[in-house]
Amino acid sequence: MLQPKATSADDKQFEYLKALHVQWENIETDELPVMWASNYDLAKYSVKQGDLLVCEGGEVGRAGILKENLENVIIQNSLHRVRSKDNCNAFLMYILINAASRNWFEIICNKATIAHFTNDKFSAFRIPLPPLAEQKDIAAFLDRETAKIDGLIAKKEQLIALLAEQRTALISRAVTKGLDASVEMKPSGVTWLGDVPAHWEVWKLAHLTTRIGSGKTPTGGAEVYQTEGVLFLRSQNVYDEGLHLNDVAYIDEKTDKEMSWSRTKPNDILLNITGASLGRTCLVPRDIKRANVNQHVCVIRLKENDFSKFVAHYLKSKQAKSFYDLAQTGSAREGLNFEQIGAFPIPLPPLAEQKEIAAFLDRETAKIDALSTKITTAIDHLKEYRTALISAAVTGKIDVREAV
């Protein structure tokens, strides 16, 4: 349908929508791409306010309603456009949301290769269809009730973001100023670090370490991952509040031996050095005796094991995050290299004070993390309730006609 260049003198450039613009319940319309197409294409594939757009590929079945009228905009052939005469598009959208929550698309589409929700599959999609007036009542009820739920979720997500800011600020203050507000300060010699307590020393990280290095992806890539065996830690496992092992990979003993140089030890510091998660960092817990990392995770091993907790906290600070950004300025922003990490300045108090600061931060960040976890659980429950409410309404389990 759409051409990368004009094929006739009558062709024009039109903005177009593709699958990534279609989100559940909404269509994103900012900064649309353009392609060459004909007036025939415009007449056949244009969109208007109220159209239901459904993804054929990608996250198959994902559906949203266009909430504004767009002039001279076309859909790509990866989308279905539903413009119903007698039925309610909003009701059908909620039907599709319910189908996705029940994994219907995974069943009907071939997920072994590339899933496609083709015209034939869409046309054969059987749905419970109440009278039009009731469809509209159900859609109106769900619009109102899901908006309330979404508002609650948004407020809780804002609270989690505020707690994350509070956590970072708490760490940043403690690891650069100490716990005694009356202590004498001195210039650190590092512009972005500012003043530090006068009795602290500023070291380059390389001078404190016996190892700064990462691993690699084993030969064979994801195909060699196991469901049990030796832990294989990737960037998606490394978070500032600790390791997340719900999506962890494993490798077998043979692969572990081949990658023995990439093994971690308890109290090693892990630092993500590439991608969107760059700068996330945590300690390897004492109960993880053996694990490996891939090339996106740097292992920092200190000469003095007792320094690990303080340094690990420092690497989470606002000052550390500033360093990560500065280290990438002017580059392709592909990530941090080992030389840059080794040059990272660390303000270091005496060991006894390090331990005091680390214990304070362990205790206070644990409180914040527990509250964040509680709020995240509440969000999960709200999302589950939202899904259940949609399912009950579109399948007639609840009568919403008097509730509208």
Image: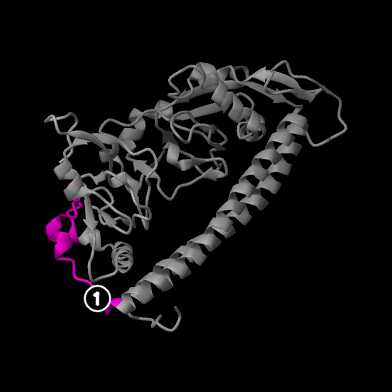
Magenta span main SS = loop
Q: What stretch is highlighted in magenta?
A: 108-132
Q: Can residue 318 be seen in this view?
A: yes
Q: Which residue is drawn at 34% across and 52% down?
A: 69
Q: Going by the image, does 307 lie left or right of 195?
A: left
Rendered-image quadrant of the C terminus: bottom left
**From what the image shows, is residue 357 above or below residue 382?**
above
In the image, farthest residue toward the front: 10
- 196 and 17: which one is in front? 17
**From what the image shows, is residue 295 above or below residue 61?**
above
Q: Residue at x 28, y 62 (%)?
A: 103
- 64 and 113: which one is in front? 64
Q: Going by the image, does 241 lie left or right of 13?
A: right
**From what the image shows, is residue 193 above or below residue 41?**
above
Q: Does the magenta stretch include residue 109?
A: yes
Residue 213's x, y, as percent? 47, 23
**Residue kind at label 1, given as amino acid type:** Pro
Q: Going by the image, does 229 lie left or right of 54?
A: right
Q: Is residue 335 magenta?
A: no
Residue 225's x, y, as percent? 31, 41
The colour scheme used to paint the residues is one colour
For disc 1, the marked residue is 128
Q: Which quadrant of the structure image shows residue 214?
A: top left
